């Protein structure tokens, strides 16, 4: 059994020299399938949900190739790697739609802390109670997915000290989000936040993971993991998605994986204690990603993020193999061995490569990699 998988992918536009330039207002006007963000410097596209990893891979690559062709005709423009304004300017907000009142609120409340690029992974789960249960587990393990994807160690041309500057600064909203006990709990909590004004609308729930659907909070059909930094490498991205899918399949067959059912923490304090653990882990991972020391929600013991991921990999690999997608999970271990994007970038800078030169190299590499994947895989599969 495979689950449906769809992505929301945000990416910056700019010059081959790494300078980020706002073009989303023109992109959404001229290209189908692209959506503007409040700031003009990043643009989003959304894949359809697919059960097949092959089809999802092509759905990742093909719109980017279309966007690259458009940017090339527009001028000497391209796509910029990373999840923050690596070369600046974080002091100025460039509105993509000056007449949008919600964008007024976003700019005035959060300014450029929300001008980031990320990957949102949506996994289809039709049963709302099972979905809420899945959100509980994934929220506690969401830091591991950030550890794998971290790609934002720079801001305004400087090293920030965080591997995911995006998640370190992103305004998680509302500030206090519980571990939802069931679907009704989620409905009642959401209605209360809208009444209080801590959420401006039903989309204004910016946490690491959330239940999603066509008429939330009432009609739900998918889990949305929002914590990941932008992963431009499609093969690496698919391995992270495969880990998430395999873990969910494991959950469906193992009630002991429900965080609210664990016995190590007294029941009356359990939910708050688990939230404190995951908040601690998110902060630790945003700073040190795979090398962060985390608290394991099941044991309460300290563990390195990369060691925890190895444990999960070993647990879920047989599930992925049984369901025919182990080959897409396997590249995960390369990230563990060789480091994520942020770690590789910082290693290069520490060895004397300046940030701009690094970004120029990454821009060229990403463009060639996408072209190769489309030529060798998507056309071969006639997708």
Image: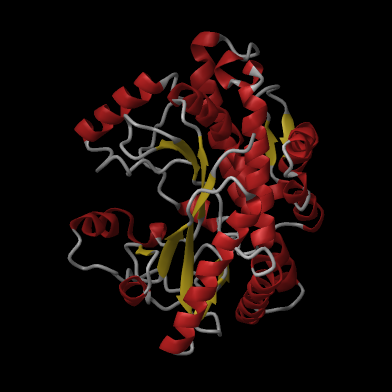
Give the x, y percent position of residue 99: 17, 65
Check the picture and name the quadrant holding the N terminus.
top right
Q: Position of residue 237 (x, y in %)?
A: 64, 55
Residue 332 rendering spot, x and y as whole percentages: 75, 50
Looking at the picture, does residue 180 appear above or below residue 113?
A: above
**Quadrant location of the C terminus in the rendered image:** bottom right
Relative to 322, 180 lies left or right: left
On screen, residue 254 above or below 168: above
Question: For the point 30% across and 23% down, which residue is it?
Answer: 188
Kindly give the residue lying farthest to the front in the view shown: 382
Q: Quadrant of residue 4?
A: top right
Image coordinates for residue 20, horizontal then vertical, percent: 46, 77
Q: Is residue 374 visible?
A: yes
Q: Residue at x 29, y 69 (%)?
A: 96
Image point 76% across, 53% down: which residue? 331
Residue 147 visible in the current orientation: no
Colour setting:
secondary structure
Quadrant in which residue 41 is drawn = bottom left
């Amino acid at each position: 059994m495979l689950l449906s998988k769809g992505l929301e992918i945000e990416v910056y536009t700019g010059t081959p020299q790494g300078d980020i330039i706002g073009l989303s207002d023109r992109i959404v006007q001229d290209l189908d399938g692209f959506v503007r963000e409040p700031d003009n410097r990043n643009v989003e596209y959304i894949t359809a949900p697919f059960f097949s990893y092959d089809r999802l891979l092509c759905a990742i690559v093909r719109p980017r190739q279309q966007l690259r062709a458009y940017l090339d005709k527009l001028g000497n423009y391209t796509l910029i790697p990373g999840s923050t304004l690596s070369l600046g300017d974080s002091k100025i907000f460039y509105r993509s739609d000056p007449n949008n009142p919600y964008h007024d609120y976003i700019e005035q409340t959060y300014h450029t802390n929300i001008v980031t690029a990320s990957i949102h992974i949506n996994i289809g789960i039709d049963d709302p109670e099972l979905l809420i249960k899945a959100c509980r587990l994934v929220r506690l393990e969401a830091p591991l997915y950030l550890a794998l994807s971290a790609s934002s160690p720079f801001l305004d041309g400087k090293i920030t000290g965080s591997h995911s500057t995006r998640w370190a600064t992103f305004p998680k909203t509302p500030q206090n989000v519980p571990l939802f006990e069931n679907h009704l709990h989620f409905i009642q909590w959401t209605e209360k936040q809208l009444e209080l004004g801590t959420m401006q609308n039903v989309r204004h729930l910016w946490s690491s993971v959330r239940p999603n659907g066509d008429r939330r909070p009432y009609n739900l059909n998918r889990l949305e993991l929002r914590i990941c930094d932008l992963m431009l490498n499609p093969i690496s991205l698919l391995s992270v998605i495969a880990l998430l899918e395999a873990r969910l399949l494991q959950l469906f067959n193992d009630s002991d994986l429900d965080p609210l059912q664990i016995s190590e923490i007294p029941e009356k304090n359990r939910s708050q204690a688990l939230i404190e653990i995951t908040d601690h882990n998110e902060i630790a991972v945003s700073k040190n990603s795979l090398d962060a020391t985390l608290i394991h929600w099941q044991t309460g013991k300290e563990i390195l993020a990369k060691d925890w991921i190895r444990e999960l990999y070993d647990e879920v690999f047989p599930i992925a193999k049984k369901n025919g997608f182990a080959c897409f999970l396997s590249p995960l271990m390369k990230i563990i061995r060789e480091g994520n994007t942020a770690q590789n970038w910082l290693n290069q800078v520490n060895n004397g490569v300046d940030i701009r030169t690094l970004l120029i190299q990454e821009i060229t590499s990403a463009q060639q990699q996408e072209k190769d994947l489309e030529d060798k895989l998507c056309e071969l599969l006639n997708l």
